[in-house]
Image: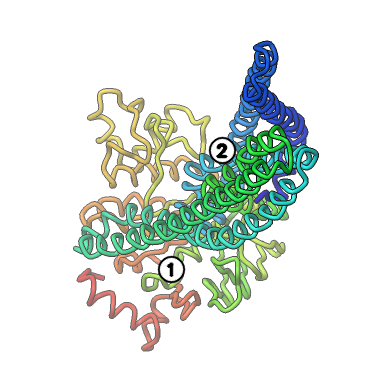
Amino acid sequence: MIDKRLLSLPGTKRLFIMLAGLTFLQAFAILFQGKYLAEALVNSWEQKSLQTIILPMSLFAVAFLLRHCFNWINNKVVENYAENTSEEIRSKLLDKVYTSGPSMISEEGTGNLVTASLDGIDLIENYFKLIFTKLMNMSIIPPVLLIYIYTQNLASGITLTVIVPLVILFMIILGLAAQAKADSQYHQYTILSNHFLDALRGLPTLKMLGLSKRYAKNIYTVSDEYRRRTMNTLRIAILSTFALDWLTTLGIAILAVFLGLGLINNSFPLFPALVTLILAPEYFLPLRDFSSDYHATLNGKNALNSIFDILNYKDTDTEDGLESLEWNEKSEVDIKNLVFNYSRDQSNIDSSLDIDHLKLSGYKNIGVIGKSGSGKTTLIRALGGFLTPDSGVITINDKSIEHFKQRSWQNELTFLPQSPYLFATTIAENIAFYKPDATKEEIQAAAKKAGLTEFIDTLSLGYQTIIGEGGRGISGGQQQRIMLARAFLAKDRHVLIFDEPTAHLDIETEYALKKPMEELFKNHLVIFATHRLHWIQEMDYVIVMSNGQIAEQGTPEDLSKHNGAYSKLISNMRGDQNELL
């Protein structure tokens, strides 16, 4: 139940030592509590003087208070550890997400990371609060009590010793079943999280295509499957608790029968029988407590394992092999045998990206086209350094690099995605994303080139207007104009990467943005993924993607001369979209 990696967390070993000491003291308090209670009852039964009853009852009260005092200190120590450690794990997780970036998000899924950072941390905190105390109680208290019971009555000690392995055997059998169900259930939970977040992001597109109601049935199916798995897991968890309670109750009953028969036959005195019977429930109590919280600890353990896997994610080496890079019309990138898989397990799966050869150079407009799922976005993300290829030979200006996550290359990039991300701050600060030290005049000049001036003039606070997280409060077209203004302001960056930036815009808004975008293309290497035909006219070179591979590449004029993948795709796009070339 305890992952060995827990020992690597700060303060865990010290916690074990403190808990062991406190639990030993608690065990002896329980022992004395039972001993003095039995002594008082025996003296009362034998009608001895009041003094012989008051003293053991006073000692019983002291032992009772000490027991709960040690238990309170124990819980406080564990709660403090759980709160501090879980927050430290959350901090490490967020740092890992920040440093590893989109490559890890692409593999783990945004929903999985959100679940791990929010619900997962809460489960881990609860796991820490339960597992250490329960496990320490189960490891220390029963042996201490059993040794004392052996000194009082050998037969009772043997009876309890025989019953415990049976209880543990049932715990193992039912525990393995519960763990398998819990693992499956937590895995389904992460799938549901990713599924729900993806559906939420794609809701505007689904509504536009009239598929929202149909997709609602899909969400219902996934959610119902999660409900069914949860109920199956709870059924086994409740069954395991019931079985353990039944076994321990049966064990105490068997012990009581033997003790009763012994007393009737005068086989042993009243005190050993009574103290054994009082301590027997305390002997089984740690096992029952552990069983009752077993399912909760399983959820916490699964969450912890998931987060440990994320923390152990191998970061891409960002050491800059380029030293310096200033992209110009003579610069070039040469890519050979580039392979990338979204899944970490690369066995029995097709490559998500498999590029034999691709060459980019100078200030050209490179169009990337293909059907949905053909690999356009994956190629764009790999070129942007957001995804780390599994293998490939990459050279920039004849210098070999392993991936595009290089500081010099990144410093040359301006990225414009489908859904621009804007921060909850002023419009001016959002425009100055790539150049935080930009002057007011530079920001205004960039906004003018992007066609933002008219919109900003209508705002009472102008450039100091605060917009919502993710661009809430302004239209999609204005969000894209802010992204264009960022690019105009970043004059020292000469590589533009567009990932279908107008996919969610209507045709009128897109054409309004086309002129400032064409202005931006000048003196840049432009890599433009699109599914809109009119952009192909602006491209010097076109890459046609299909199933993660380059089906064709060349100038639009050359590709249109034969009935290849380019011509078929163009014909298909004309028929499906009703757009003018």
Is disc 1 in contact with disc 2, using a CB cutoff of under 8 Å?
no
Q: Who is closer to the viewer here, 551 or 89?
A: 89
Q: How is the image coloured?
A: rainbow
Q: Residue 36 appears in which quarter of the rendering?
A: top right
Q: Residue furthest right?
A: 151
**x and y percentages locating residue 33 in the rendered image:** 67, 26
Q: Image point 62% across, 51% down: which residue?
A: 326
Q: Who is closer to the viewer here, 351 or 45?
A: 45
- Answer whether residue 444 is visible to the viewer in this image: yes
- Answer whether residue 323 is visible to the viewer in this image: no
Kind of element beneath mark 2 = helix
Q: Pointer 1: residues within 10 angstroms few (<14), some, or many (20+)?
A: many
Q: Which mark is residue 316?
A: none
Q: CA distance from mark 1 to mark 2?
A: 47 Å
**x and y percentages locating residue 565 in the rendered image:** 40, 83
Kind of residue at badge 1: Val
Q: Residue furthest top?
A: 51
- Is 409 on the left or on the right of 454, as rendered? right
- Does residue 332 lie above or below 519 as drawn? below
- Does residue 420 lie above or below 369 as drawn? above
> Which residue, given by chain and number where applicable, does mark 2 sit on?
125
Q: Which mark is residue 368?
A: 1
Q: Residue 280 appears in which quarter of the rendering?
A: top right
Q: Who is closer to the viewer here, 38 or 427?
A: 38
- Is 578 on the left or on the right of 235, as rendered? left
- Is 265 on the left or on the right of 509, as rendered? right
The earlier-in-sequence mark between 1 and 2 is: 2
**x and y percentages locating residue 424 in the rendered image:** 39, 33
- Does residue 211 lie above or below 431 as drawn? below
